[in-house]
Amino acid sequence: MSTFDASTLVYVLQIVIGGLLVGIGVHFVPVGGAPAAMAQATGVGTGTVQLATGSGLTGLISAGLMMSVTDNILLIVLSGAVGAMIMIDVTMLVGNWVYIYGVGVPPVAAKTDYDPITKDPQPPYISPGTVGHGVPTVSYVSGTIGGLMGGAGGSLIYYALMNINGVSGLSAFFAIGIFVVNAVIASYNIQGTIEGFHDPKFKRVPRAVQACFVATLIIGIFAVLIHGGA
Amino acid sequence: MSVAAGGGESKIDKTKLTMYGLGGGVLGIYLAHVLNMVTGTGYFSFLAGLGAIAAVLMGADAVRRVCAYGIGTGVPSIGMMAMGMGLVAAWFGLAVAGVAGPIIGIAIAMGFGYFVGMLANKIIKMNIPVMEEVLMSLGGAGAMVIIGLSVVISGQIGYQDMLNDVVFTGYIAIVFIAGALAILQPFNANLGPDETQDRTLVLAISTGALGMFAAGIGSLVTVGVGGAVLTMLIAAAIWLKAFLWFFKLVKRDSSGVVGTGLLPEGGL
């Protein structure tokens, strides 16, 4: 059993910050769930956990690659963030191709009258009977920010665990474990769907911050006590 | 609260299922360990796989109980969360408690589950009355499935051996995702207003057997060909039996398709 000293406390702190980043990041990702899969709601047509895990795992892979050449925490976390951003951006881009060229709908947000970034009016483009469709500019930018936070959070957890047990397989899967717990708590907070930072549901972030903080702290304390064998 | 995603009557009581799941899971894991140690072979690894199937049953029933409330995020989310909590708790138990590891791990996973359920109800305000109890079962089931499938691969409970056989080989990825799918798939495939408990649980046996089969393939290089083939054969037999049973229940529960002929002249 690892001893519990000052540096362990720092690692617990890093894990908690990582968990919080994941929990907040999920609120930025435009998740549409099943309605979006039928182009009847704004966002990518799948669940939060699938999107968050997909981008988070890509972030972990890029963070792991960076960790094999350097110990610099900033480079590792940035590398993880960029990996997750690329993954979520590609998902949203290809999703948009399907919505635009396949389904034949323009990307439009339903929770705001004007896109805060492009200032384009939104309501004229919403098909009757739907609550938006596709991934409009504001949701795309929001999703990229979400990828940044999720990837950075995941790689921070990985970095902390790697310094404790030194076993990449164990650290990666513990990071995934802590990652999915926070992603699911956050997605319960938004009840499964959100359009991005302009969505009224985004105001619920403080609740997720509290819940993710406590949950990550408890799981993190156990995770740092696991050693990497002889 | 309305029943949003279906979920019919429960014929088998949840307490009974939880008891059998916990008892079967722990018994399977320890029997595999002890019999393998005593005989010095890997032939009894399949018992841990049977334990994992018992745990999958308990988890799948917990999933169907909570998802009947309509959690809004899809069924997979709660299965993945169970595995996330179970993974950390299971390996913590194995790392600090030696042979008592599985029991400690399962207990801690259930603690995590209760706690996260409380957070979901108190802070996120989901207000699902069964949340704490269900996540407790799910955390325990997740930990048991992870330990069970890991013991199938390593053949025994011992932190260093399990690290060598399960983590360094990368099989932990298969254990994680096959276990998660085994727990979440049964209800995800059956949900709807006509969902019945026996159909979901029979599908859980078949998905659990598939997880056991995958772990059996992993154990080819770790416990030896004899033990691995025995695990795979038993898993395949269970899967076949359960799947045929499931098919029969699907036919029982499905609506009849009756030919009515063409509409009569002027019938529109």
Image (spheres, rainbow, N blue to C red):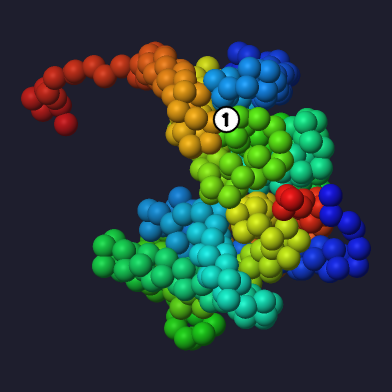
Which of the 4 image quadrants contains residue B22? top right
Which residue bears the numbered disc 1?
A: B152
- Count of residue discs: 1
The answer to whether any part of residue B80 appears in the image is: no
The image shows residue A210 at horizontal and vertical percentages of: 80, 60
The image shows residue A119 at horizontal and vertical percentages of: 49, 86
| Marked residue chain, label 1 | B
Q: Quadrant of the N terminus of chain B?
A: top right
**Nearer to the camera, A158 or B151:** B151
Which of the 4 image quadrants contains residue B71? top right
The image shows residue A192 at horizontal and vertical percentages of: 58, 53
The image shows residue A165 at horizontal and vertical percentages of: 73, 58
Which residue is located at x 14 percent, y 25 percent? B263
Which residue is located at x 12 percent, y 23 percent? B262
Relative to A46, residue B111 above or below: above
The answer to whether any part of residue A40 appears in the image is: yes
